[in-house]
Amino acid sequence: MTEARYTPLRERHESLGASFTDFGGWQMPVRYTSDLAEHHAVREAAGLFDISHMAEFTIEGPDAAAYLDHALAGRLSTMAVGKAKYSLILTEDGGIVDDVIVYRLGEDRFLIISNAGNRDAVAVALPERTGEFEVVVADVSDDYALIAVQGPASEQIVSAIEGITEVGTPWHEQKYYAWADAFFLGHPLLIARTGYTGEDGFELLVRAADAAALWDAALAAGSAHGLVPAGLAARDTLRLEAGMPLYGHELSLDTKPAQAGLGRVVASDKDDFVGKDAALPADDARVLVGLTADGRRAGRAGYAVVTEGGTAVGEITSGALSPTLGHPIAMAYIDPAAQTMPLFLDVRGTKIPATVAALPFYRRKK
């Protein structure tokens, strides 16, 4: 039996009364007080998340950019220093090993942040693809912690955190999917304007040894702005409303990017990359759609999507009663021809009428 892993913030979570759950082999806080309260705090003010279970890899060397163009589905070589980009690691068969965010730290230096549950798979895939490229791949996950501040008040909060100094880019100039250098307590800090909630926000990559101090400083800075610690339950409903896929639900080794609505992420005009020849799905492959319903009964992952006659034409991958919108929402893979049919969610034997809806379900106010 594999021993459960905890982040450097375990004691902070316990002192706040967090309930824990297993996620990718890690014991993570699922909630501190109320799922709904934490969700609404992020939409209305801000939430503080421990996402230190995520994995980090550095890519360094004169061929780093060319290597990433080969190893990943996107075109990373044209990304400017200081920017970040969402991308995919594919198998030779075109399935998705993981979805990642790539940060260009320098001309020949990149950072990849991957999902916790896929750390081992990514740690195998990246070195396997180095070939003759002059590049060094390093798993630096255990050296760092990752803390996210998400919500409309996030800039006010992060800019007020005591101990953050020498921020490389003025706060008002920091754009979405970009990052800035800084220091926290005299040690390097990476401040990325990225997130997984559909709100404005920042993800702070800090030395593991400084994680608790940064967490405390963020809570102190946010005390006047409605900041609350938030767990995985709120994070899940927030990302679902934002139409963001979760590996193991919307993404898997059996999923092709275009099925998941991620065809735009694949730079198919590149000369070659791992998975290129098999990245396109079959014409009849199920596609990811958004679904909405009336009432209060929500479809959950694994529930069938059926026709009026009861024929199964799909399956829900994620579903919930939306805290923000007040009605059930879901993402599901369905047969392409079913998109124009009357559809129903099979909720424990009861057919709930559902409507295909554009993703995302929720967009933040600019």
Image (spheres, rainbow, N blue to C red):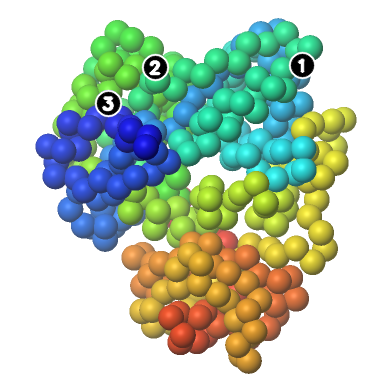
Badge 3 is on which residue? Answer: 8
Q: Distance between the residues labelled 2 and 1?
A: 27 Å
Q: How many marks?
A: 3
The amino acid type found where label 1 is placed reads Gly
Q: Would you call the spot at circle 1 few (<14 residues within 10 Å), some (14-19), or many (20 or more)?
A: few
Q: Distance between the residues labelled 3 and 2?
A: 10 Å
Residue 99 in percent (x, y) is at 59, 40
Pair 2/1: label in front: 1
Residue 261 in percent (x, y) is at 67, 55
Residue at position x 75%, y 44% in the image: 94
Per the rendering, the mark at residue 114 is none
Residue at position x 53%, y 55% in the image: 249
Nearer-N-terminus badge (3/1): 3
Badge 2 is on which residue? Answer: 143
Horizontal arrangement in the rendering, residue 306 relative to residue 145 (left or right): right
Q: How far apart are marks 3 and 1 (CA)?
A: 35 Å
Q: In which quarter of the image is the N terminus?
A: top left
The amino acid type found where label 2 is placed reads Asp
Nearer-N-terminus badge (2/1): 1
Query: In which quadrant of the rendered view does residue 322 lie?
Result: bottom left
Q: Identify which residue, 219 or 88, lies in the foreground.
A: 88
Horizontal arrangement in the rendering, residue 360 relative to residue 296 (left or right): right
Q: Would you call the spot at circle 2 few (<14 residues within 10 Å), some (14-19), or many (20 or more)?
A: few
Q: Do the residues labelled 3 and 2 touch (CB within 8 Å)?
A: no
Badge 1 is on which residue? Answer: 131
Position above or below: 312 against 108: below
Residue 7 in percent (x, y) is at 30, 30
Nearer-N-terminus badge (3/2): 3
Q: Identify which residue, 246 or 301, lies in the foreground.
A: 301
The amino acid type found where label 3 is placed reads Pro
